């Protein structure tokens, strides 16, 4: 039995109008995100038998987003961020042929694409949760979405300037809390955010490149 | 009296209901054709049931085995569907699926690759060749996310957590949709001249199901109420491998990919029992010994396929038989073993979410122990009756695609044909709607009385002083359908079900949801009951009419396929007296060239790929 089963029982027997989001009940859709005993978790993947029989279990809505009712929060800000990201634009397909990409070249992109959009990483991110900088930082979820586009072998769009200026890559201070709560075990910080920060640094802060751009007006 | 002009109102050329694969693909197509498009969905965007699809999307790309072609895909689909599929739909599907998969790649999808860098394809039940493009065992997530990220830049209206309650008609054609916002409980009116139902199936009428809460048969019920015809609803697919233990996860899907990648089914005596259940029709293409099956898995092209990869209806019935005859696993299923056949590292790489799911939910390590599995209600082959080319229902302006529509899969669906169905027919529903609107001048009129009635019916659930608990009525329905309309059916049980459904209809008409209308789960549950009951009754009545056993529909009192029944479909519609009526309609003869392909020997098709 998992925490979501208990919530369903409460809903059916004790508090019929209890609001909780869920869909797949198998950790694949990322709907039932909440804070269980203070930890951001999916209720459908949190087993009851890990708690002592007499232990009180607290369930709270995600703190980073406004509460609509009970355990349901307004996560629409996330959908707005997604829409700001310039979409995938592939290089043209070779005439009469299929695209070719090697598995080893898509492994890292596939890791990011495992994301189920539960927004637990957004919930736990200090920049969004404690510093309330939703105006300046898109959060770990969209940093790895940006990484999945930047590292896509077929993509042709350059998002590096936007990643720095618009999406706030500099605000992440690499505490890895997002990675720790990710139910898909995506290495958000190490494989996604840090490489993006490095690309930003290479492009915008490398003194030699800066000098050569000045001199040769590249 | 409600003043309809006070309702929040949106206007679109076309409104798509449901944002799974079919709905997203339909909306993308409508929008690309210059139509003002709206897309409404019960959940948040990207959470629809497509996300749960694991194994892959079937398309005859021929990347892994060059002998594959659309004709062989078509033949496999017809044979899997026991020749009850709409011939033209199965043809369109097999021909167009490869382009739809390539298109997803252009929109950013990243499928697993072959050694040459092409889209890799895996084996699956009923498919002659490795045909399923996939991403590990999370293909559905890849598809829905790709479509979603593509869609949000197309500028059409997306209405999330907005549930459709009723289709509005004007003189027998589509005119609009009344819905409500789950968050606020406020009603919302969509004025539109074309509607695409992409509402999925109705598995929630059963207790043991792989379906999420959304699958309450809304599309079937709304189409039925609006006067459209439903078809083939007796064919409800029980996926052979759902989890059976612990009880709280009973029914959750275990992908067919486990068997495609080498997993085998064992009974309590450790016997690979599927060798005893090979139907005559498939005998020449199925391995006769374990040795041959193992050689096939190792890539020996002269060997035939293992019997675990027979179609889902066959495997599900075999499991039920093993359990009923006392050879089941401790919790009433059978064993699915991949641990003793595939190295742990390969299992974790090819089936990561299965590994995770069993580890987290059942505390079973599938790289070391077998899984316990049993049948779970998974998919509706039947649905809204549509034209094969345009996807328009019998109600002008009303379209359906994906699981909401009937015809593509006949009596049984092959794994992997659902994701391709969504893409092919989602798109065709969009082109069909565009074509329909081109010939339509006058705007549709909203019937204010119909809107007011629907609003009154919905709010009565909140307003009445007392009444039955909607969750209890739903549980009651699930128990009835599991007991009387399961895998194996009989006239006696089906008649009991009809009587019970009458009682449940009365119960449902008096349910009470306590609390206010804001995000009120009890109210949402109560509103879904109407769809569930119409769907359950339609399935039961259709199952009673079809006096044979074909594909997913098994009657103990009428065993075996009967030729007469291959020539007909069972239609369900609302009769003039307001009650549900059924009709048996004759199918047109298949086009000669398609029949030739479907009944060809496999060698002839392999020799002449298209």
Image: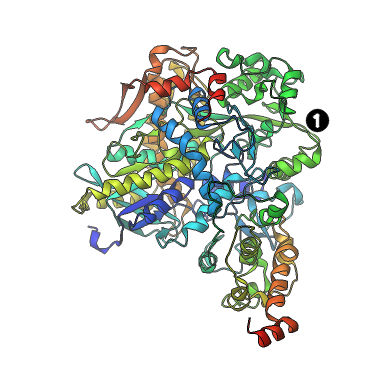
The answer for which chain carries disc 1 is B
**Relative to A177, is B168 on the left or the right?**
left
The image quadrant that residue A130 belongs to is: bottom right
**Residue B297 percent coordinates (x, y):** 72, 27
**Residue B60 percent coordinates (x, y):** 55, 35
**Relative to A178, is A78 on the left or the right?**
left
The image quadrant that residue B262 belongs to is: top right
Image quarter of the N terminus of chain B: bottom left
Question: Which of the pair B243/B455 is nearer the observer?
Answer: B243
Callout 1: SS: loop
**Relative to B242, is B421 on the left or the right?**
left
Provide the residue designation for mark 1: B340
What residue is rendered at 66% in x and 24% in y? B308
Does the image show residue B244? Answer: yes
The image quadrant that residue B55 belongs to is: top right
Question: Which of the pair B503/B527 is nearer the observer?
Answer: B527
**Residue A200 percent coordinates (x, y):** 68, 75
Label 1 packing within 10 angstroms: few (<14), some (14-19), many (20+): some
What residue is rendered at 55% in x and 61% in y? A88
Total marks in image: 1
Q: Compared to A168, does A150 lie above or below?
A: above
What residue is rendered at 32% in x and 40% in y? B392
Q: Compared to B514, does B553 lie above or below?
A: above
Does the image show residue A14? Answer: no
């Amino acid at each position: 039995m998992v925490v979501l089963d208990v919530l369903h029982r409460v809903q059916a027997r004790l508090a019929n109008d209890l609001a909780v989001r869920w869909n797949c009940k198998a950790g694949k859709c990322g709907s039932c995100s909440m804070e269980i005993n203070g930890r951001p978790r999916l209720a459908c993947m949190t087993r009851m038998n890990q708690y002592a029989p007499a232990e009180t279990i607290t369930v709270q809505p995600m703190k980073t987003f406004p509460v609509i009712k009970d355990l349901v929060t307004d996560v629409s800000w996330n959908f707005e961020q997604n829409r700001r990201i310039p979409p995938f634009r592939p290089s043209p397909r070779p005439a009469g042929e299929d695209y070719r990409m090697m598995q080893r070249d898509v492994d890292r992109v596939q890791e990011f694409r495992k994301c189920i959009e539960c927004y637990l990483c957004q919930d736990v991110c200090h920049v969004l949760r404690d510093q309330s900088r939703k105006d300046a930082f898109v959060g770990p979820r969209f940093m790895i979405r940006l990484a999945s586009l930047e590292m896509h072998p077929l993509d042709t769009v350059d998002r590096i300037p936007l990643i720095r200026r618009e999406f706030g890559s500099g605000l992440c201070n690499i505490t890895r809390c997002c990675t720790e709560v990710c139910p898909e075990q995506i290495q958000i910080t190490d494989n996604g955010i840090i490489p993006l920060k490095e690309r930003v640094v290479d492009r915008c802060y490398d003194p030699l490149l800066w000098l050569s751009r000045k001199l040769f007006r590249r | 009296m409600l003043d309809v002009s006070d309702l929040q109102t949106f206007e679109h050329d076309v409104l798509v209901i449901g944002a799974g694969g079919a709905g997203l693909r339909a909306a993308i197509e409508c929008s690309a054709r210059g139509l003002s498009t709206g897309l409404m969905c019960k959940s948040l965007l990207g959470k629809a049931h497509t996300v749960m699809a694991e194994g892959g999307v079937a398309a005859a790309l021929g990347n892994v085995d060059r002998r594959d072609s659309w004709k062989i895909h078509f033949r496999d689909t017809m044979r899997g569907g026991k020749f009850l599929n709409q011939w033209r739909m199965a043809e369109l599907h097999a021909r167009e699926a490869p382009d739809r998969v390539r298109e997803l790649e252009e929109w950013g999808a990243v499928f697993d690759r072959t050694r040459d860098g092409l889209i890799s394809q895996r084996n699956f039940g009923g498919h002659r060749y490795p045909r399923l493009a996939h991403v590990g065992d999370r293909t559905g997530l890849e598809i829905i996310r790709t479509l979603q990220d593509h869609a949000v830049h197309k500028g059409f209206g997306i209405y999330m957590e907005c549930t459709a309650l009723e289709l509005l008609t004007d003189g027998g054609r589509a005119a609009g949709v009344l819905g409500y916002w789950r968050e606020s409980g406020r009603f919302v009116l969509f004025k539109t001249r074309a509607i695409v139902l992409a509402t999925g199936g109705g598995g929630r009428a059963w207790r043991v199901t792989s379906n999420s809460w959304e699958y309450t048969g809304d599309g079937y019920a709304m189409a039925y109420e609006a006067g459209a015809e439903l078809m083939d609803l007796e064919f409800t697919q029980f996926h052979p491998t759902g989890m059976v233990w612990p009880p709280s996860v009973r029914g959750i899907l275990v992908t067919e990919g486990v068997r495609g990648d080498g997993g085998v089914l064992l009974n309590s005596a450790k016997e690979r029992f599927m060798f005893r259940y090979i139907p005559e029709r498939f005998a020449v293409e199925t391995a006769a010994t374990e040795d041959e099956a193992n050689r096939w898995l190792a890539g020996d092209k002269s060997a035939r396929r293992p019997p675990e990869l027979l179609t889902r209806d066959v495997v599900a019935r075999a499991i039920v038989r093993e359990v009923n005859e006392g050879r089941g696993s401790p919790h009433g299923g059978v064993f699915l073993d991949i641990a003793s056949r595939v190295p742990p590292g390969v299992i974790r790489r090819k089936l990561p979410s299965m590994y995770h799911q069993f580890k987290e939910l059942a505390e079973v390590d599938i790289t070391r122990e077998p899984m316990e599995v049993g049948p779970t209600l998974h998919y509706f082959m039947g649905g809204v009756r549509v034209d094969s080319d345009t996807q328009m229902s019998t109600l002008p302006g009303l379209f359906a695609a994906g699981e909401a529509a009937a015809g593509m899969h006949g009596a049984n669906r092959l794994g992997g044909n659902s994701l391709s169905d969504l893409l092919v027919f989602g798109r065709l529903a969009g082109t069909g709607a565009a074509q329909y609107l081109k010939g339509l001048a006058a705007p549709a009129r909203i019937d204010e009385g119909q809107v007011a009635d629907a609003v009154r019916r919905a709010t009565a659930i909140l307003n009445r002083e007392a009444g039955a608990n909607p969750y209890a009525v739903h549980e009651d329905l699930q128990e009835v359908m599991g007991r009387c309309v399961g895998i194996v059916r009989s006239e006696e049980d089906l008649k009991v079900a009809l009587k019970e459904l009458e009682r449940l209809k009365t119960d449902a008409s008096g349910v009470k949801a306590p609390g206010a209308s804001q995000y009120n789960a009890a109210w949402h549950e109560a509103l879904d009951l109407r769809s569930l009951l119409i769907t359950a009754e339609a399935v039961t009545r259709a199952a009673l009419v079809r006096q044979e056993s074909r594909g997913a529909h098994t009657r103990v009192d009428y065993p075996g396929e009967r030729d007469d029944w291959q020539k007909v479909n069972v239609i369900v519609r609302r009769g003039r007296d307001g009650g549900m009526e059924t009709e048996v309609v004759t199918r047109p003869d298949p086009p000669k060239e398609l029949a030739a392909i479907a009944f060809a020997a496999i060698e002839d098709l392999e020799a002449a790929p298209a």
